[in-house]
Amino acid sequence: MTWEASSVRDPLNWWTVWAKHVPHLRAVALTVMKLPAGFAAGERSLSNASHIQSRLQTRLSYTTLHKLLYMYYNSRVVPDFLASALPSPTAPLDRRMHTVELDGVDDGVDDPDECPDAYTAAGAMVADVEGGPVGALTSADHSADDDSPPGARFSPSH
Amino acid sequence: MRSEILKHLTENKRKNPRDDCPYQRALDAMDVAGHVSSDAPAAKQQAEPASGTSTGSSSVPFINQLTTDEVKAIHTTCERWIYRWALPLRTTESPDCINFSKALNAVYTPPSRYSMAETLLPEEFNNQQRMVDCFVRRCVDDGDVEIGGDLWGDRLNNSMCNVIIFTPDSLYVENKVSGEARHSAENTAEFFSHRIGLLGARSVVAIVTDTENKMQAMCALLQKIYPWMLAIPCAAHCLDLLFGDMCKHPYVASALDFFSSSTHYWRPTSMAKAILNRSQLAEYGKTVQLQHPGDTRWQSQLIGTKALLTTQCAVKKAAVDAVFKSECPAGGTAKHRAAALKASTAVRHETNWDTLALFDELLQPLGVALDVGQSNGRGLEAVRRALFTFHEHFEAFSYQPTTEGTGLRQLVLRAAEKRRRYTLRPIHCLAYLLDARYVDKKEQLDTDELSAAIDLLQSMARAHDIKMGTRKYKCTADKLPKDYSRETEKEIMAEYTTFKSKAGSFLHCP
């Protein structure tokens, strides 16, 4: 059986869902299809930084700017239910506030039992997060993957 | 509305007597304090049972203190609102915001800007950082990530370098402020190398930057250390440069000059703008705003040109309007009078409009590609396709049959070829090869491109095997056993042949 090129809409989805009998090529193809073509996202981060450090807030230090930009930019990418997975001092209030974010459907469901998957995932993530120190990425042990020590020194002779 | 809320809350309370909602307490407190709207009695009447016994507000205390935990939870919600929408920190100090929060809960006061910046911000930042770290770690464990960066300066003239991680969604992770050690290619490469090391060098597949020389040099340095890493120049930047190259031709430049001077005259000059608006209303029934071009954003020239062409008739009529002729070329300073004369003369020359229309038509596909490239970071496979389309469009375009037209054709084709060589990397060609949509297209890669893409496919398969090996044996690449699995490298070409022949049972897997 052959496939038709005209039936393909999104190549990344195509390689994700189809082509399971060419697993090695699929693994490489998925890597290739996920690569970004441009740096618009980076430019957008700079534009967001200019928005935060507006003309009315020129005394904002770069440390504060970094923190504000970090939260502004990343809150749009990291799923919301992760944020709600953080230990909450008052569970009922917090749960009420994150109902829409947790189940992803604006149906007003207030009962956590009605969205067990989100809570299970959130619970797993809490375990992950609580397992590591703050900034875990920066202190994670990736030595097994590395061919060179972090922060290799560069010189023009390289 | 309020009566409905009161009714709902009262019914809710009857059903769940232990429900301790702060919002309800606030409304109850407002009832006691007499801050009730005119429809409240009717609502209470509806809400009360038929027997007429009051369930009422008299049993609810006037002030309900919030516990520390409750205040903290509300603070968290408030700060997330401020931070996630990049609102000024002083927003919570505004009387309206305080009134709003008091209306919801009479005993709650929003945090001040100082506690927002000094106490709450670091705490919330830490929480967010833990989440992002965790998210990135999971992405790294599941597959690969890409890294990107750019240099910029803030309003306080701090020179910074931003780091973005693509998972493939982009995450902003870090910035570095240069001190006395400037952002040279070496320093920036060292900074990136540190981040790559933390992510796991074999997990970072590519580095994406703009086309600035310093960043390109940095990429070259990193590729010497991490030879498997791909350097991808930003396609949108490259297209922008192609746009810029074409705008340098005198013929195109004259069109842009006409556009620029017209927009600069008709847009900000109050009398001229008022006359143009009147003319637009009479012509189209609405006003059309002219667009200012940006300095190095070449597509803004195209957008501005479109806006000017849209209102061509109205501009022509405004230039011969009686009020315009009596007021503008005669009033104001000498500079204003000269500008008015120049603008009114220029719009009457049909050649200017024709050149502008040609410019718009010629660069239209480039503008579309830039739009797509800037709005969506993905689509590596579409870069080669876009370059095919440009070539076809620029070849087939009907240039004017004059010496200038021939010169423009030569310049456009030369610029397109130059930027194609600069933009196109083997990874773009490989992405084109692996895109199932383009398998049957008549435009296919030439021999050099094909050979480079196949080489890259094999080296990526090799890198994939090494990465899997290092994970399996928990060692670095140079300490891998000699017999580690090279299955991907062995099978990749056979599987590629299967893919190209469109053979095999590509059945949908639910």
Image (cartoon, grey):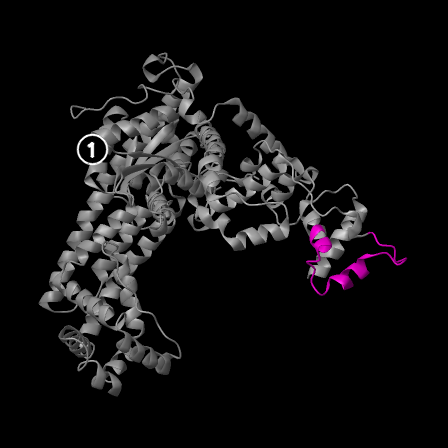
Tell me the kind of residue under disc 1.
Answer: Ser
Q: Which one is in front, B431 or A78?
A: A78
Looking at the rendered structure, the secondary structure element under dot 1 is: loop
Towards the viewer: B417 or B127: B127
* Residue B229 located left or right of residue A4: left
Q: Is residue B37 magenta?
A: yes
- The correct choice, above or below, for B335 with respect to A22 in the image is below
Tell whether position A153 is magenta.
no
Question: Is residue B184 shown above or below B37?
Answer: above
Left of B389 or right of it: where is B413?
Answer: left
Quarter in which the N terminus of chain B is drawn: bottom right
Residue B215 at what x, y percent from top left? 23, 37
Residue, disc 1: B184
Task: Count neighbours of disc 1 (C-alpha within 10 A) and say few if under 14, some if 14 to 19, many if 20 or more.
Answer: some
Residue B398 sits above or below residue A69 on the image: below
- Judge whether residue B31 can be spotted in this image: yes
Work out whether residue A21 can be spotted: no
Residue farthest toward the bottom in the current orientation of the protein: B322
> Residue B198 is drawn in which quadrant?
top left
The residue lying furthest to the right in this view is B51
Which residue lies at the image location 20% right of the left edge and 34% below the top edge? B217
Residue range (magenta): B29-55
Residue B320 position within the rendered picture, expressed as x and y whole percent measured from the top left: 23, 84
In the displayed structure image, the side of residue B99 where residue B504 appears, left or right: left
